[in-house]
Image (cartoon, rainbow, N blue to C red):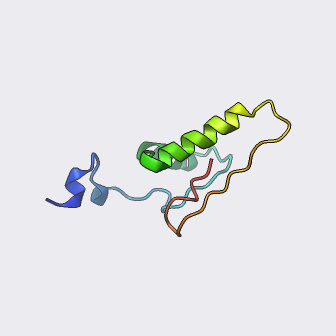
Amino acid sequence: MLNRAVYQKDPSTRKLVNEGVASVNDDSSEHALAVLRYELETFVCDGQYAKGLEHILHTYLGNLAAAQQPAVWVSGFFGSGQGNRV
């Protein structure tokens, strides 16, 4: 069995629309919306990543009324997804 056989969508038939780099901006062009749609459709959030994201969002929402917000530091090896910041 090939690795790609276990995926819901065969990665060998898909092109990385964002070239593997997420960008945060206010561009609302057709291309930018297509990239955003792709990122949302292919984003995987489970395991420890999901737990960490849940903790960050819970802490943020729990401190909305506070004068100061706790800081978040995200680190990891190049390409490990730390660029996907909240």
Residue 35 in the image: state x and y as whole percent. Answer: 51, 50
> Along the horizontal axis of the image, is 3 left or right of 54?
left
| Residue found farthest to the right | 67
Foreground: 20 or 2? 2
Residue at (54, 50) in percent of width and height: 31
The correct choice, above or below, for 5 with respect to 76 in the image is above
Foreground: 36 or 50? 50
Foreground: 59 or 43? 59
Residue 84 in the image: state x and y as whole percent. Answer: 56, 54
Residue at (48, 61) in percent of width and height: 20
Residue 22 in the image: state x and y as whole percent. Answer: 56, 56
The answer to whether any part of residue 17 appears in the image is: yes
The answer to whether any part of residue 33 appears in the image is: no
Residue at (62, 38) in percent of width and height: 57
> Along the horizontal axis of the image, is 51 left or right of 27?
left
Image quadrant in which the N terminus is located:
bottom left
Residue 56 in the image: state x and y as whole percent. Answer: 62, 43
The correct choice, above or below, for 59 with respect to 52 in the image is above
| Displayed quadrant of residue 45 | top left
> Along the horizontal axis of the image, is 67 left or right of 71?
right
| Residue found farthest to the bottom | 78
The correct choice, above or below, for 64 with respect to 24 in the image is above
Numbered disc total: 0
Residue at (62, 35) in percent of width and height: 58
